[in-house]
Amino acid sequence: MTSTAPSPELQPGAYDPTSPLVASGNLRRREAVSRAISGLATASSLVAVAALVIVTVAVVRHGAGALSLSFLVKDPPQFGGPGGGIASAIVGTSLIVAMAAIIATPVGVLCALYLVEFSAPGSRPARAMRLALDLMQGLPTVVVGLFIFGLVVKPAQAESGFAGSLALAIIMLPLIARSSQEVLLTVPRGLRDGTDALGVDRWRAIMTVILPTALGGILTGTILAVARAAGETAPLLLIDGAFTPGTTVQLFGHAVPNIPVLIFTAVESADPSAFARAWGAALVLLALILIANVGARVLLARSRARMGL
Amino acid sequence: MSSSGGDAIRPRVRIQDGSASRPVPAAQRNDNGGTRRAAVFDIRDMSVHYGENRALDWTTLRIDRNLVTAVIGPSGCGKSTFIRSLNRMNDSIPGFRIGGQVLYHGHDLYARQTNRVEVRRRIGMVFQKPNPFPKSIYDNVAWAPRNLGMKSGLDERVERALRHAAIWDEVKDRLRASALSLSGGQQQRLCIARSIAVEPDVLLLDEPASALDPVATAAIEDLMHNLKHRYTIVIVTHNMQQAARVADRTAFFSLDERDRTGTLVEYGDTDTIFTNPADPRTRDYVTGRFG
Amino acid sequence: MSVRASLNPRAAARGRVAMEGSLGDRILRGLCIAAGLLAGGTLLAVAYQVISGARLSISTFGLPFLVHSAWAPNLGHFGAAVMLYGTAVSSAIALLISTPVAIAIAIYLSMLAPRAVRIVVGPLVEMLAAIPSVILGLWGIIVLAPFMQRHVEPALHGVLGFIPIFGPAQTTGLGVFTAGVILTVMVVPIIASLSRDLFLSVPRELTDAAESVGATRWEVIRGVVLPTTVSGVSAAIMLGLGRALGEAIAVASVIGAGNVVHVSTFETGNSLAARIALDFAYIVSNLHTASLFYLALILLVFGLLTNLIARQIASRYDVHRTFA
C-alpha cells in the first residue's frame, strides 16, 4: 500500500503513508471509545476511594464527640445513661485478640514452613494443606462462631473470652499461613543453598537464618490478621456476647467485653448514650485498624526494599 | 525534505536535551549508494537515554523505501533500542528520553501532535520471541484488520497475509486451530502475517530469527526478498551472514568503550560494508575479530 | 495450588524437600505436619459440629426446610426460604454492581494510572476491605439507609418501577437492596485487587504485540488482557460471591430483619448469616438452636462450594496460560 493508492478515504484502512501522523481512518472514533472507557475506569476508582473517605469521615464525625481520655479509661455507667467509656471493651478486645494471635501465629508459621521448606509444591500433602487452608479462609465467620459454640461453649455452659480467641484464631490462621508462605518464598534461594553447603541442619538453618530474614514479613502478616480479627463481630456475638461491663482479665469461663459486640448491641439498644459510645468505639476501632494497615504496608515495603525486591 | 548523501565529518550540534555534543570520528560515512530513492526515515542526531544511562549516541542515517536495511553489531550496542524507537515502542519504558529527530516521511515521529497508534499502524513490528495471541490462527491475523474496520473481504485479506508470510499452505486447513499449536518457526511467520495483514508502510523486525532453528531461519530470510517489494524493511540481527544474505543496506552499531553508549559507526550498501568497510571497527567486526 | 498463588504467577514455589535429617529436622518437620493436621482437623470438626448441631432440625423438617418461609420460634415454625431469598438477592445485587466496577478499577490501577497515583490509590482500595463489617453496618443504618430511602429508591422506582423488584420506597431504607449495596462495598476491593494483579501479570510480549499492530489501549485490553485473564477474574468473582454469601453483621444491620419474602428489593428481608446473628441472643428452644445450625449448614455448603469452584477455575487458568 504505497502512495499510488486512490482516494484514501474510500476503503477502510486505506491511508497515505506520507500524510501527517494524525489519526486516520476510523482511529478518531476508536480513540474516543478508548478514552471513554478510561474515563469510566478512572471514575470507578474515584468512587471507591470516595467510599472509603465517606465512611471514614462519617465515623469521625459521629464518634469524635464521644472521644476523650475518660472515654478510653472508664467503663460504661452501670445502669446506662450518658458518660463513661469503653475501657473494658478495649482491654477485652486486646486480650482476646492477643490470645488468638498467640494460638494462630505459631500454627500458621509452621504450616507455611511445611509448604515452603518441607514439601514439594505439587505433592499430595502440600496440596491437601493448601486446600485445607483455603477452605478455612472461606468459612463464613458466623459458622466459625457456631462451631466454637458447639465445641466449647455448650459443653462448658458458659461463654468465655477464650472461646472468642479460639474462633478468632481459626479466622486468623489461614491469613497468617498465606502471608508467611509468601514471605518465606521471597527469602533468597542463596541463603538456603549456602547453609546446606555448610552442612548445617535444615532446622537450624530455618531457626537461625531463614525465619529471622522472614521475620519482618511474618510480623506484617500477623498485624494485618490481627487487624482483621479485631473487627470480627459475628463469632464473638455468639460465644462472647453476654458480658457485663466491667474490666476483667479473666478470659476463661467468663464472657469478656469487646468492642465489636459493644458496637453491634448498641445499635439495637434504645439508649442514645450507648449509641454515642458505640460511635466512639467505632472510631477507636477504625483508627487502630487503618493505622495497622498503613503501618503494615510501610513495614512491608521497607523490608522488601531491604531484601532487594 | 532531507539532505542528500552523507557527511564525512559531522558538525557540532546540540541535541534537544541540552547536553553538549561532540565531534564524530571522521571515518563515519553515510552513503546512499548512488540511486536516488525516497527516504522513509530521516534520522538526525538521534540519541536515547534511559534515565541517567545513555543507551544510544547521536545517530544519523536515512532509511530508504522498499529496501531491506539491516542493523548489526555486538550485543548491547543499542540495536534494539534503535529499532524500537522507530515505532515508539520504547515509550512505555521508564526513564525513556529521546534526543535528536526521527522524521518519517518528513513528519516528526516524536512531535507532540503525533498520534502513537497511527504510528504503529503504519510502522509494524515483529519481535524476537514469537508472540502470537492466544487465539486461533485466523483470529490472530484478522484481529487488527477488524479493529481498523476492514470487515469485508476479511477472509481474502487473511489468506493474502498468510501467503505472503509463506505459511498459508501449512495452516490453510486449520485456521481455527489455536496459534499456540504451531511450532516456533511457524508462529513467527504467523506474527509476520499478523503484522502485514494491515498493510503497513514499514516493517521492523527485531532479531526475528534468533529464537528459531536454521530451517525456520531460512524460511524467514526468504520472505524478506519478497516482502521488500511491498514494504520498507528494517531488520536487526546479530547474525552477520544473515545481514549479508538479505539486506540491501547495512548499519553497523558498536559500543563506545569509554562510556558504554551505543553508536552508529558505519552505514552503507551491504556489499561495501562487508567487503570494503571504511572504519576499522567495522572491519574488525565483520571479519570476526571481535563481537 | 491455592487460588491466590495460582492467580499470582510471580510466587514461584521453590521449596526443597528435606526427607532425611537430624533429630532437630525431624522434630521441626513433625511440628509442621502436626500444624497441618490441626488445620485439616479443624475443618472436619467444623463440618461435624454444624451437622450434629442441626440434627434435630434436619430430622424435624428435612429438606422442605429450604422452602418453608415461616419463621416463628415461639410456635416452633422454622423455614429457610426467606433467608435463602434474601441471601441470594442481596448477593446477586452485590455481584452485579461490583463486578464491572471492580474490573474497571483494576484496569485503572494496572494500565491507566500513573505510577504516583497507582501506589496511593491501590492501597486505598485495598483498605476499603479492611473496614470491619460492624462499622459498615453502623454506617449503613445511620447514613446509607436514609440516603437510599430518600433519594436512591424513589429515583429507581421512578425510572424502573415497572420492574417489580424496584417497588416503592419504604419508611426506612432498610431492606434487601441496601444490604446489596453494603455487600458491594465489601466485595469490590476483593475482586479489584485480585483482578489488578492478574492484569499486571499479562506478559508484556502480548500487549506489545497488540500495540504493534496499531491497536488503541481499549482494544489491547479487550483483545488481549481480558481474554487472557478471564478464568482468573472469574475465580476472583467467585471469591467475592463467597464473601457476600457469608456476611452476617453488616447485612443484619441493614436488611431490616423481615420475615416475609417480598418481590420488591426495597422491602425488608433476611439472610442466612444475618438470621443466625440476630436470633442467637433470643433462643427459645432446642429446635430453635438446631434450626439456626441448619441455616449454618446451608451457609457452610455455599462457602465451601464457592471456594472449591474458585480454585477449580483458577487451576484451569494455569493450564491455558501456555504460549511460545
Image: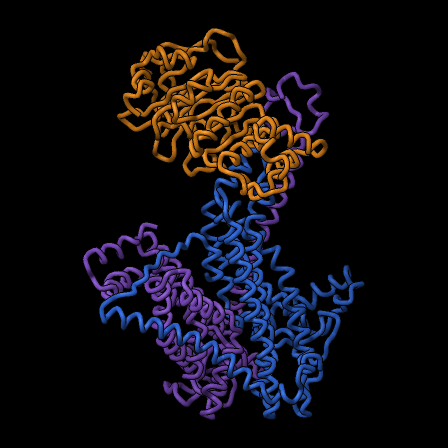
Picture coordinates of residue A260 (x, y %)?
Answer: 49, 77
Instruction: Give whichever of A263, C11 is nearer the camera.
Output: C11
Number of marks in the rendered image: 0
Q: In the rendered image, is residue A262 in sight?
A: no
- Residue at the farthest left position: A198
Picture layout, residue B273 above or below residue B203: above
Picture layout, residue B251 above or below residue C97: above
Residue C187 found in image quarter: bottom right
- Apparent colour of chain A: purple
- Residue at the farthest top position: B34
Instruction: Give whichever of C238, A60 is nearer the camera.
Output: C238
Answer left or right for B59 relative to A47: left
Q: Residue at x 54, y 86 (%)?
A: C52
Picture coordinates of residue C260 (x, y %)?
Answer: 72, 79
Picture coordinates of residue B162 (x, y %)?
Answer: 60, 30
Instruction: Give whichever of C64, B240 is nearer the camera.
Output: B240
- Apparent colour of chain C: blue
Picture coordinates of residue A103 (x, y %)?
Answer: 36, 76
Answer left or right for C169 relative to A166: right
Q: In the rendered image, is residue C300 in sight?
A: yes
**Which of the colour schemes (rainbow, by chain, secondary structure, one colour) is used?**
by chain
Q: Residue at x 63, y 75 (%)?
A: C271
Q: Which chain is orange?
A: B
Residue C294 found in image quarter: bottom right
Picture layout, residue A199 above or below residue B37: below
Q: Residue at x 71, y 26 (%)?
A: A11
